Image: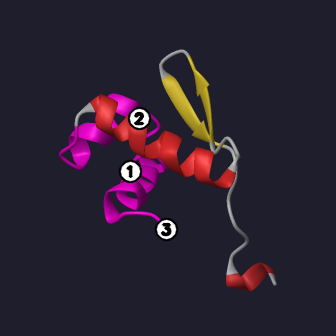
Amino acid sequence: MHTLNQLRSLVALAKLGHFRLAAESIGLTQPALTQNIQKVEEYYDVQLFLRERGRVCLLYTSPSPRDS
C-alpha cells in the first residue's frame, strides 16, 4: 500500500522531470521525495523513471481507458 505522499511524489516528478523542483512543489525535501520514489519502485520491483544528468523521464505509463 502506498501513502498519499508517495503518490504525490510520483505525480510531481513525472510532471516536472526534476527531483528538486518536484520536491519543492509538494513541500518535501529532495531526499524525502527520492525515498518515496524508491519505496514505490522497490514495492513493484520496477524502475519507473530514467535518471539522467539533471533530468528525469517517466519510463512506464498505464494505458488509458480509451486504449482498451
Residue to which mark 3 is pinned? 1
- Crowd class of label 3 (few under 14; some 14 to 19; many from 20; radius 10 Å): few
Q: Quadrant of residue 31?
A: top left
Mark 3 element type: loop
Q: Does 17 sit above or below residue 8? A: above
User: In the visual, does 48 lie left or right of 11?
Assistant: right
Q: Earlier in the sequence, mark 3 or mark 2?
A: 3
Q: Nearer the viewer, mark 3 or mark 2?
A: 3
Along the line of sight, which residue is nearer the eye, 32 or 66?
32
| Main SS of residues in magenta | helix
- Crowd class of label 1 (few under 14; some 14 to 19; many from 20; radius 10 Å): many
Residue to which mark 2 is pinned? 34
Magenta region? 1-28
User: Which label sits on residue 9?
Assistant: 1
Along the line of sight, which residue is nearer the eye, 7 or 55?
7
User: In the visual, does 25 lie left or right of 60?
Assistant: left
Q: Earlier in the sequence, mark 2 or mark 1?
A: 1
Labels 3 & 2 near each other (Cβ < 8 A): no
Mark 2 element type: helix
Q: Nearer the viewer, mark 1 or mark 3?
A: 3
The residue type indicated by label 3 comes to Met
What residue is shown at x 37% (from left), y 63% (from top)? 3
Q: What percent of the width, then of the height, locates residue 33?
A: 35, 40
What residue is shown at x 70% (from left), y 46% (from top)? 46
- Crowd class of label 2 (few under 14; some 14 to 19; many from 20; radius 10 Å): some
